[in-house]
Amino acid sequence: MSGVEGAEREDHDGCEAGVGQPSRGMMKEGAGPRLIIVCGLPGSGKTTLAKAIEGRLGAVRFSPDEWMADLSLDLYDEERRGKVEKLQWRLGQQLLALGQIVIIEWGTWGRSERDALRSGARALGAAAELHYVSAPEDVLLERIQGRRMESPPIERDMLRRWSEIFQAPTPEEMDLYDKPLIADL
């Protein structure tokens, strides 16, 4: 499964193309190339966490929801979402090869998708970390309804179906990833 089926985007602060600027002294010395995958269901806090990491590490953040909204594309158009994610991953791989830190904020609902990203990053000599964010169904729904970005809106039954197909990372899967550069988020 590719990305967040049904769109998860929280208001962004106007950073062009997801490029954050690290504060002086915030970039971890010797971090090297690193892929940071942020996974979870819509409304779980992926964007909030990804932006915090982006700001602290000066990473490049890829969010298909933001690109699709900026291009006036339907957030539910899975074919175009797949193309946006493919383009973002191609750019992400180039940045990793240049020694940068890249954040993938696609939802990455399936383990096979996360495995492919991790393997691709490691093939480029990059570290890979995984952040899983979750929240109870009522909280997810409240956050989704509060942001009012999806049209048609995400309903409870849709969210339940997605919860059933989402493959949450297991402790064994988490062990395949490097320790996060930032532990206090």
Image (cartoon, grey):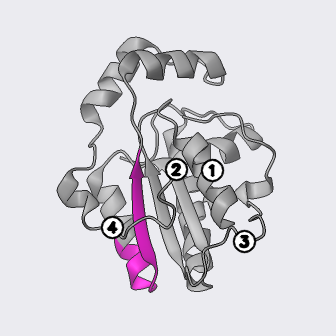
* Circle 1 or circle 3, nearest the eye: 3
Q: Earlier in the sequence, mark 4 or mark 2?
A: 4
List the residue tagged with mark 3.
Answer: 25
Kind of element beneath mark 3: loop
- Between residues 77 and 123, which one lies in front from this camera angle? 123
User: Is 130 inside the magenta-drawn segment?
Assistant: yes
List the residue tagged with mark 4.
Answer: 177
The answer to whether the residue labelled 4 contacts the one labelled 2, judged by CB atoms less than 8 Å apart, is: no
Count residues near mark 1 (Cα–Cα under 10 Å), then give few for <14, some for 14-19, many for 20+: some
Q: Earlier in the sequence, mark 2 or mark 3?
A: 3
List the residue tagged with mark 2.
Answer: 185
* Circle 4 or circle 3, nearest the eye: 3
Residue at image location 31% in from the left, 64% down from the top? 115
Q: CA distance from mark 2 to mark 3?
A: 17 Å
Q: CA distance from mark 1 to mark 2?
A: 8 Å
* Circle 4 or circle 2, nearest the eye: 2
Q: CA distance from mark 4 to mark 2?
A: 17 Å
Q: Is residue 63 left or right of residue 72?
A: left
Q: Which mark is residue 52?
A: 1
Residue at image location 34% in from the left, 66% down from the top? 116
Kind of residue indicated by mark 2: Leu
Residue at image location 77% in from the left, 64% down from the top? 23
Count residues near mark 2 (Cα–Cα under 10 Å), then give few for <14, some for 14-19, many for 20+: few
Kind of element beneath mark 1: helix
Q: Is residue 39 left or right of residue 20?
A: left
Q: Which residues are magenta?
A: 119-132
Kind of residue indicated by mark 3: Gly
Q: CA distance from mark 4 to mark 3?
A: 25 Å
Q: Quadrant of residue 167?
A: top left
Q: Is residue 33 left or right of residue 178?
A: right
Residue at image location 60% in from the left, 48% down from the top? 64
